[in-house]
Image (cartoon, rainbow, N blue to C red):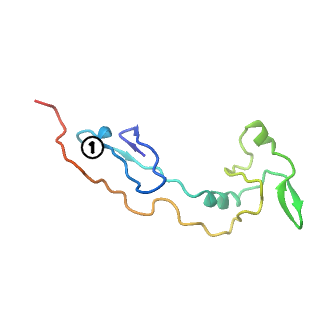
Amino acid sequence: MKLNGRELGILWKPPFRLEVSDALHAGANELEIRVTSLWPNRMIGDAALPDDVEWGRAGRKNTYPVKWPDWLVNGTARPSGRVTFCTRKDVYAKDDPLLPSGLLGPVTLRATDTQELGASK
């Protein structure tokens, strides 16, 4: 979260509250909130993209990488555009339902103390 361009931190567990007084100023303020989805949702989305790993058989399914992909070994971009990587292929499928995620409630600003901002006399 950012307030007036100042990084305030990451909220990843309750109570989801930050002290922002030092970042506020008189007049209009700009609040930026970035929301991230759950990792399983990203994996479900990636399952719809082309595969870029050579998978080997374990039983009747192609479930494990035959070798580490070149893009992983070389630290280069994935040719498929996928973001996630797992050493098991069948964790999620493209048609799996997405999990509820993201900003699930309203964002509110609560004053715990009030002070007048402006030039001092």
Q: Is residue 92 above or below residue 66?
A: below
Disc 1 residue type? Answer: Ala
Rendered residue at 62%/70% (across/down): 97
Residue wearing tag 1: 28
Front position in the image: 12 or 107: 12
Q: How many numbered dots are placed on residues in this image?
A: 1
**Could you tell me residue 58's position as x and y percent?**
88, 62
Front position in the image: 97 or 16: 16
Q: Is residue 89 left or right of residue 20?
A: right
Rendered residue at 34%/44% (across/down): 30
Q: Residue extending furthest top?
A: 121
**Could you tell me residue 77's position as x and y percent?**
71, 41
The image quarter containing residue 40 is bottom right
Rendered residue at 77%/57% (across/down): 88
Rendered residue at 57%/58% (across/down): 38
Q: Is residue 84 above or below residue 48?
A: above
Front position in the image: 58 or 117: 58
